[in-house]
Image (spheres, helix red, strand yellow):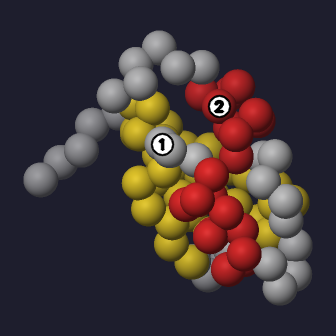
Amino acid sequence: MQKIFVMIKCELGRAYEVADDLIERIEEVSEVDSISGQYDLMAKFYLKNGTDIGHFVTQSVQTIPGIKDTFTITAFKAFQ
């Protein structure tokens, strides 16, 4: 599995709606958090190995109504 984080900038007043849509529409989402700063939400996704991350983000995440911008981070190793 590949783990990615996507930071999401929403249209004003739509962060909660976008978070709900991400959870309802995208099977690969693990969690969605509201954050402060330049972006409104940070979502964690687990993708099957070999999934094209660029296509996943542009076709699944960025098409959610209310999303203005995204910033994707790929995780390599989790430390415990």
Residue 38 shows in this picture: no
| Residue found farthest to the bottom | 13
Q: Give percent across and percent down for residue 49.
A: 40, 19
Indicate left or right for 33 with 64 as reference. Answer: left
Q: How many marks?
A: 2
| Depth order, front residue of 44/20 | 20
Return the residue at label 2: 56
Q: Nearer the viewer, mark 1 or mark 2?
A: 1
Residue lying at 80% horizontally and 69% vertically, measured from the top left: 10
Residue 14 shows in this picture: yes
Q: Give percent across and percent down for residue 13.
A: 83, 85
Is the C-beta separation of discs 1 and 2 under 8 Å?
Answer: yes
Amino acid type of the residue tagged 1 in the rendering: Glu
The Cα atoms of the two marked residues, 1 and 2, are separated by 10 Å
Residue lying at 87% horizontally and 81% vertically, measured from the top left: 12
Residue lying at 72% horizontally and 75% vertically, measured from the top left: 17
Q: Are there few (<14), some (14-19), or many (20+) residues within 10 Å of tag 2?
A: few
Image quadrant assignment for residue 78: top left
Which image quarter holds the N terminus? top left
Q: Is residue 32 above or below residue 57?
A: below
Q: Give percent across and percent down for residue 38.
A: 73, 72
Q: In this view, does 36 lie above or below 42?
A: below
Q: Are there few (<14), some (14-19), or many (20+) residues within 10 Å of tag 1?
A: some
Residue 80: give its label.
none
| Depth order, front residue of 55/21 | 21
SS under mark 1: loop
Indicate left or right for 41 with 38 as reference. Answer: left
Image quadrant assignment for residue 46: top left
Image quadrant assignment for residue 59: top right
Amino acid type of the residue tagged 2 in the rendering: Phe
Return the residue at label 1: 28
Q: Is residue 72 above or below residue 20?
A: above
